[in-house]
Image: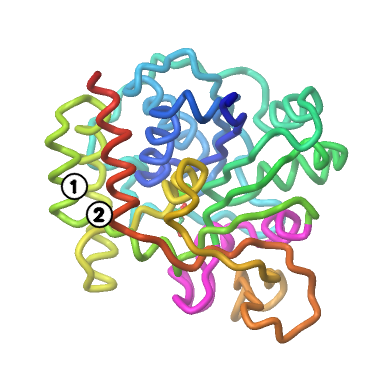
């Protein structure tokens, strides 16, 4: 079976970085057409650099990496250095990447790549604010028919927000972009905090990854060793949730997740609940089922998959 063509749009961020490693570990199943960076956890000049450094560590200096939007579509920019550190990938040494930054804007790359692809053939995997994806859709709606599925990390239902009481960071950072994506009419699978908070990088799990003793696993252990601090203090749980790798894990092994077709609508006006994802889990409205809302995962199976794939970088 031919590998599934994907574009990963990200804002590294330690968890985005691990997501990139997981995707690059599986070339027989996933063909990464390109990595696009967006402003999010840290400003764009850092997210694009961090994405390129992950390609270096994974031995993929050939990977096409593009810089995209440096600010949200409407609201004022926001970042998350308090969680990810000032570099965005605190926990490892930051070095100037060898992997080049391509000159084309990420939005143009997404548009050009999708228009050149056959119908319903490319999967988009956004793990940061949805600015690049929404801007591409807004600019050239014709790209939509070329999208097979959008598998994103964002939103929250029962778990509540992680940046405000009612909003998760990726959606809050660009709610207007999120509204465009959830309403775009193509299949969306959403990994919200309800599921990502179930995959915690505990000491035991990180130790198993570190013991793999290859450059990717060592970088992963280093980043997770930093990334857990904020969540551990905030939630009292051990280990940071591996939000973004849930997207690629779903592409590799969907059967470890549970989801339900629902309507997900995004609040774009309210000052109090801006960025809230209203998940109609019990069908109390007649709104269209626009999202496969993922609400559960087998955490042990998730970490078995992740650890097994990271081990491949030692071969
Ligand atoms: O709320 C978690 C999300 O926000 C993750 O994608 C993390 O990387 C940050 O972007
Ligand atoms: Ca992210």
Q: Is residue 32 left or right of residue 49?
A: right
Residue 41 visible in this rendered orientation of the protein = no
52 shown above or below 295 = above
On the image, which quarter does residue 92 sit in? top left
Q: Are discs 1 and 2 less than 8 Å apart at CB? A: yes
Q: Is mark 2 within 8 Å of ligand 1?
A: no
- Across and down, in percent, residue 199 comes to 33, 59
On whether residue 177 falls in the magenta region, the answer is: yes
Find the magenta span and give its range. 155-183
Mark 2 or mark 1, which is nearer the start of the sequence?
A: 2
Q: Secondary structure at mark 1?
A: helix
Tell me the residue that label 1 is attached to: 206
Q: Answer yes or no: disc 1 within 8 Å of ligand 1.
A: no
Pick whichever, 64 or 40, lies toward us. 64
Question: Is residue 144 something that shows in the picture?
Answer: yes
Alpha-carbon distance for marks 1 and 2? Answer: 6 Å
Residue beneath the point at 62% across and 29% down: 5
């Amino acid at each position: 079976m031919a590998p599934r063509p994907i574009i990963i749009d990200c804002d590294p961020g330690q968890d985005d970085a691990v997501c990139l490693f997981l995707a690059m570990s599986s070339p027989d199943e996933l063909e990464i057409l390109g990595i696009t960076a967006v402003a999010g956890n840290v400003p764009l000049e850092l997210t694009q650099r961090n994405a390129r450094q992950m390609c270096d560590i994974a031995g993929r200096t050939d990977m096409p990496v593009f810089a995209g939007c440096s600010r949200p579509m409407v609201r004022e920019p926001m970042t998350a250095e308090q969680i990810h550190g000032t570099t965005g990938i605190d926990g490892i040494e930051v070095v100037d990447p060898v992997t080049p930054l391509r000159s084309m804007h990420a939005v143009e790359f997404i548009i050009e790549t999708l228009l050149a692809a056959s119908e319903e053939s490319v999967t988009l995997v956004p793990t940061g604010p949805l600015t690049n994806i929404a801007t591409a859709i807004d600019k050239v709606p014709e790209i939509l028919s070329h999208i097979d599925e959008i598998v994103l990390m964002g939103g929250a239902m029962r778990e509540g927000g992680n940046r405000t009481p009612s909003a998760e960071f990726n959606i809050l950072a660009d709610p207007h972009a999120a509204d465009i994506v959830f309403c775009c009419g193509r299949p969306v699978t959403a990994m919200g905090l309800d599921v990502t908070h179930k995959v915690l990088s505990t000491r035991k799990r990180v130790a198993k990854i570190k013991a793999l003793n290859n450059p990717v696993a060592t970088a992963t252990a280093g980043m997770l060793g930093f990334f857990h601090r904020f969540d551990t203090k905030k939630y009292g749980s051990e280990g940071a949730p591996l939000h973004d790798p849930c997207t690629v894990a779903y592409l590799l092994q969907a059967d470890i997740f549970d989801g339900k077709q629902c309507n997900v609508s995004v609040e774009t006006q309210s000052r109090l609940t801006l960025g809230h994802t209203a998940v109609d889990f019990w069908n109390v409205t007649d709104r269209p089922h626009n999202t496969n809302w993922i609400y559960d995962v087998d955490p042990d199976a998730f970490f078995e998959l992740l650890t097994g794939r990271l081990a491949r970088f030692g071969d």
